Image: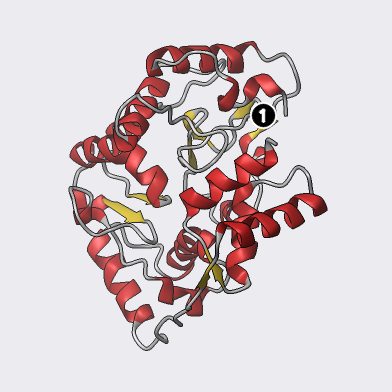
Amino acid sequence: MPDALHVSNLKSKRLESRVQEWASKLDSYDGQRTCSRQLYAGDAWSIVKEMEAQHSSNVRWWVCSAGYGLVALDTILSPYAATFSPCEDDTMIVDGQGALGHQKRRWWRELAQWRPASYLGPRTIADLAKQHPMDPILIAASTVYLEALEQDILEARQQLHSTEHLSLLSAGFRPNGPLVESLLPCSARFQARVGGARQSLNVRLLRLILTHHADSKDKSSIEGFLAVELNGLPELPTYERKPMSDESLRAFILDALGDDPDARHTPVLRKLRDRGMGCEQKRFRKLFHMIKET
């Protein structure tokens, strides 16, 4: 991936200027571009591609991208690295630019003002709802991304024929605030029903709904279906991870970097936790980068 298309390499500091610089870099990229369904990889995206093939006749698919904003799944994109997660290297978050949630929502709003080359589709979820007010919208997003989409989702809900036509799947999202009305039950207990890792739980629940409850448009009907599915599933196991000293963490990180000098902090932290050890994510990230940069 070209260095220029990493958000971490943007020169501008003010958010609006950063978005303009970013859009210019994406538009001016003269290398090979790829359809979004091939660009994105990983467990969750493999399930999305599977669902798209199975439901191509009655479902339209959209991507909520920190790099591109809202785009259709068949959009041709430049390769890029951008995320709303504040713990990743290519986060769009900048220290001193305001609260994290506010920055995310502003970035999403500013991205919507830009139209990528040759793209003619809607640029916001609200625009999509306005174009198809009778159609249900089902959004599967992590809590990090849902925070960025919040205002757009609220505006979309007002454009639909019924607020029941908008449903949200977001495992771990705290049930408070204005999005609660649209939130579906998304307990980690569903892992016993849909399998896979917790990182792909949202999209696995989406597959469950499309496979067994695709005919309903109403959020309350989907909610009832999921409640029945959840009934009787086992409670979550509890893990008691042992806290680690900085010295022990340094040794673990040095070993990981010795095996893979290009390792990123998130997979290394996951490996640490898989071994029953504990460390707060912000602390681990800070220590990891301190060690990697020395």
- In this rendering, would 149 be left or right of 294? left
* The C terminus sits in image quarter: top right
Q: Residue at x 49, y 80 (%)?
A: 192
Q: x, y percentage for residue 53?
A: 61, 53
Q: Residue at x 49, y 53 (%)?
A: 281
* The N terminus sits in image quarter: top right
Q: x, y percentage for residue 114?
A: 44, 16
Disc 1 is placed on an element classified as loop
Quarter residue 69 falls in: top left
Between 240 and 66, the residue placed more toward the observer is 240
Marker count (numbered): 1
Q: Give above or below for 147 relative to 252.
A: above
Q: Residue at x 66, y 47 (%)?
A: 41
Between 132 and 72, the residue placed more toward the observer is 72
Q: Give above or below for 72 relative to 174.
A: above
- What's under tag 1, amino acid-wise? Pro
Q: Residue at x 57, y 36 (%)?
A: 89
Task: Give the residue pinned by disc 1.
Answer: 79
Q: x, y percentage for residue 267?
A: 64, 55
Between 99 and 229, the residue placed more toward the observer is 99
Q: Does the image show residue 124?
A: no
- In this rendering, would 202 be left or right of 150? right
Q: Does the image show residue 63?
A: yes
Q: Give above or below for 34 relative to 40.
A: above
Colour theme: secondary structure
Q: x, y percentage for residue 108?
A: 38, 29
Q: Residues within 10 Å of mark 1 (few under 14, many from 20)?
A: many
- In this rendering, would 132 be left or right of 78? left
Residue at the extreme right of the image, as rendered? 259
Between 222 and 285, the residue placed more toward the observer is 285
Quarter residue 214 falls in: bottom left
